[in-house]
């Protein structure tokens, strides 16, 4: 009897190739596409993924390879668990990463439970990340295609869910994925990749936030000594490390150093002021072998503070309630609240991560 597997089909080339590969391997494949916005949702750009055209494309791929395909309405859950969190993070002066919340709360929680409800043994996605099983310990690793690697966005994956997940593209280069799409003759073989945040495909965060909640509470832009240099139209327009839109003439380039929600101020300074060697994280999720507990130190690991950040060596000291202190062995610039601090073994294994505070 064939093993049943659900494939999360976004309508793009990656998840479509995953469906093809798994069917070729002999699985009973069911395709599921999540409808995250309805056509009358005025907040979301009509070119956003997981909307009209992508749903149509996923259906066409499923028809081409002869697998059942279902569209599930997740708009309310996506709005409550991802979009609202995105907006509230900006209100708190943070720089959120909705892709991680989508993985954490939608794909590998809600959709995984749905897959089990369909009687599936596994849920597969088109993420570029590798999975290895060593001595009955399942681990996640950086993908072979390091330019496409998505391990940074997976640090909140639950350890207990990993036996139910499959990532068939982890060992493939993107160019080979395209070649396979052509081999399978699926209609999305040459479809361009989606860019930016899925519900803001034009990248206009300011416009989205203003439309969503009417942001724009004026406040002061100050230097590190507390001197008022200018005013701003809302802290949501700024992120740590930013230089644009400051409109400050001090003779030297100024960068956003810190955003203080309590006083509605943006603190700026010279680039050197961006450097940090230590910071705190919350909700640290451990994915490495064995268990960790309070007062444990994870030393000589590689740490990333942004998705495209070159990792640096450091250590993580575990505290209570899933909090942790991070110490980098060399300073880095642009550590921003709300971003992920992701930890790797030097062999590429994803050890986990938490949210920068």
Image: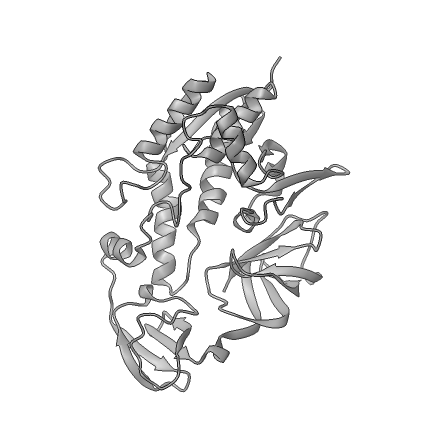
Outermost residue on the right side: it is 135
Question: Horizontal and vertical percent for residue 276?
Answer: 55, 73
- Coloring basis for residues: one colour
The one of 65 and 5 positioned closer to us in this rendering: 65
Instruction: Reply above or below: 291 against 26.
Output: below
Q: Which residue is pictured at 53% across the width and 75% down the height?
A: 275
Residue 327 picture quarter: bottom right
Question: Horizontal and vertical percent for residue 160?
Answer: 62, 39
Question: Horizontal and vertical percent for residue 348?
Answer: 67, 50
Res 116 seen here: no
Q: Which residue is pictured at 27% across the width and 35% down the height?
A: 38
Residue 49 picture quarter: top left
Instruction: Reply above or below: 267 against 311.
Output: below
The number of discs equals: 0
Instruction: Reply above or below: 233 against 128.
Output: below
Question: Horizontal and vertical percent for residue 20?
Answer: 52, 24
Res 212 seen here: yes
In the rendered structure, the answer to whether residue 290 lies left or right of residue 276 reads: right
Residue 11 picture quarter: top left
Name the quadrant of the N terminus: top right
In the rendered structure, the answer to whether residue 155 lies left or right of residue 138 reads: left
In the rendered structure, the answer to whether residue 141 lies left or right of residue 356 reads: right
Q: Which residue is pictured at 53% across the width and 46% down the height?
A: 148
């Amino acid at each position: 009897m064939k093993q049943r597997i659900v494939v999360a089909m976004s309508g793009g080339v990656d998840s479509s190739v995953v469906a093809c590969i798994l069917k070729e391997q002999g699985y009973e494949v069911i395709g599921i596409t999540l409808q995250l916005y309805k056509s009358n949702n005025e907040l979301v750009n009509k070119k956003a993924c997981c909307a009209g055209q992508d749903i149509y494309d996923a259906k066409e791929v499923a028809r081409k390879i002869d697998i059942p395909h279902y569209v599930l309405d997740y708009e309310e859950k996506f709005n409550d668990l991802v979009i609202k969190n995105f907006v509230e993070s900006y209100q708190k002066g943070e720089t959120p990463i909705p892709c991680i919340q989508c993985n954490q709360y939608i794909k590998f929680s809600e959709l995984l439970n749905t897959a089990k409800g369909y009687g599936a043994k596994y849920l597969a996605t088109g993420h570029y990340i590798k999975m290895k099983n060593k001595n009955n310990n399942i681990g996640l690793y950086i993908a072979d295609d390091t330019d496409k690697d998505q391990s940074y966005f997976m640090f909140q994956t639950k350890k207990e869910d990993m036996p139910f997940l499959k990532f068939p593209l982890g060992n493939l280069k993107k160019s080979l994925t395209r070649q396979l799409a052509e081999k399978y003759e699926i209609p999305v073989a040459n479809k361009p990749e989606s860019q930016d945040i899925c519900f803001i495909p034009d990248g206009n965060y300011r416009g989205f936030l203003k439309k969503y909640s009417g942001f724009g509470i004026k406040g002061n832009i100050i230097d590190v000594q507390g001197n008022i240099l200018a005013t701003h139209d809302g802290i949501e327009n700024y992120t740590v490390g930013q230089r644009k839109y400051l409109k400050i003439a001090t003779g030297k380039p100024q960068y956003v150093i810190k955003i203080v929600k309590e006083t509605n101020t943006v603190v700026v300074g010279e680039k050197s002021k961006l450097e940090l060697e230590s910071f705190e994280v919350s909700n640290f999720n451990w994915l490495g072998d064995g268990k960790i507990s309070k007062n444990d130190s994870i030393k000589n690991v590689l740490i990333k503070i942004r998705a495209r950040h070159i990792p640096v060596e450091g250590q993580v000291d575990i505290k209570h309630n899933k909090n942790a202190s991070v110490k980098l062995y060399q300073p880095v610039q642009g550590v921003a609240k709300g971003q992920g601090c992701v930890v790797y073994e030097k062999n590429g294994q994803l050890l986990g991560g938490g949210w920068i505070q």
